[in-house]
Amino acid sequence: MLTSVMAFIGAAFLIAMVPGPSTAVILRRAVVNGRRNGMATVLGNECGVVLWGLAAAFGLSALLLASQLAYDAMRISGAAVLVWMGARAVWQARRAGAPEAEPAGVAAAVSHGRAYRQGLVTSFANPKAGVFAVSFLPQFVPQGAPVLPTLVAFSVIWAVIDLVWYLPLVWLAGRARDAFRRRSVRRRMEQISGAVLVALGLRLALEP
């Protein structure tokens, strides 16, 4: 069991380092609205990770592998969410450039609850997380170990590892926030992050 856990931790760290929609959303929220909002987004994302892991443990996410229709429906829905979030960021950047926009250095307030929900939705918007959970987690269950409790434990470990990875990223993004207090710089940040989310959504929608 110890060997399996250590192998899983190493693999999960490598996978956490791969940037994706969650990374883009978390960094954007931390830079634009500060570390607390960034951490609320991380917590939402990790709750989504745990739920994906539990779905794999109870066999629910296996439906994404068994049914092409279910996977495509989830994929298109997730792509629509990412495109909507990206388009909204681009629109906010456009509004920030208007003469009647808020003074320089003032970002629109976002509640921690909204940041949390955004992280949770972003995690759910990626059907690859479900496919990953149902195909990846069981590989590390030792022979003879109770499958359900072990998969639940691995799901929690997976979320903790993600949390450990995102903590320094959010801290660094918070430190960089001062550089984005100027309205022109923050506007450019919104444009770039919005374009990235739109691109990720379109890629998810168009991939075979």
Image (cartoon, rainbow, N blue to C red):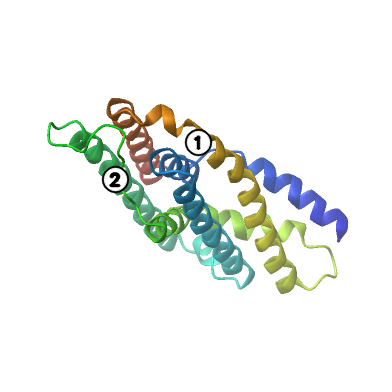
x and y percent of residue 162 in the render?
62, 50
Near-viewer residue (79 or 104):
104
Near-viewer residue (81 or 114):
114
Q: Residue at x 50, y 36 (%)?
A: 173
Q: Residue at x 41, y 40 (%)?
A: 28
x and y percent of residue 7 in the render?
79, 49
Apparent side of residue 126 relative to residue 131 in the rendered image (left or right):
left
Q: Residues within 10 Å of mark 1 (few under 14, many from 20)?
A: many
Q: Residue at x 73, y 57 (%)?
A: 139
Per the image, label 1 sits on a secondary structure element best described as: helix
Q: Which mark is residue 108?
A: 2
Quadrant in the picture for residue 98: top left
Near-viewer residue (59 or 96):
96
x and y percent of residue 36 in the render?
48, 50
Apparent side of residue 2 relative to residue 39 in the rendered image (left or right):
right
Q: Earlier in the sequence, mark 2 or mark 1?
A: 2
Return the residue found at the far left: 100
Quadrant in the picture for residue 111: bottom left
Q: In the displayed structure, would residue 154 be above or below residue 23?
A: below
Marks 2/1: CA–CA distance: 17 Å
Q: Residue at x 52, y 60 (%)?
A: 48
The quarter of the picture where the C terminus appears is top left
Kindly identify which residue carries mark 1.
173
Q: How many marks?
A: 2
Please name the amino acid that badge 2 sits on. Answer: Ala
x and y percent of residue 35 in the render?
49, 45
Please name the amino acid that badge 1 sits on. Answer: Ala
Can residue 208 be seen in this snapshot?
no
Can residue 43 be seen in this snapshot?
yes
The quarter of the picture where the N terminus appears is bottom right
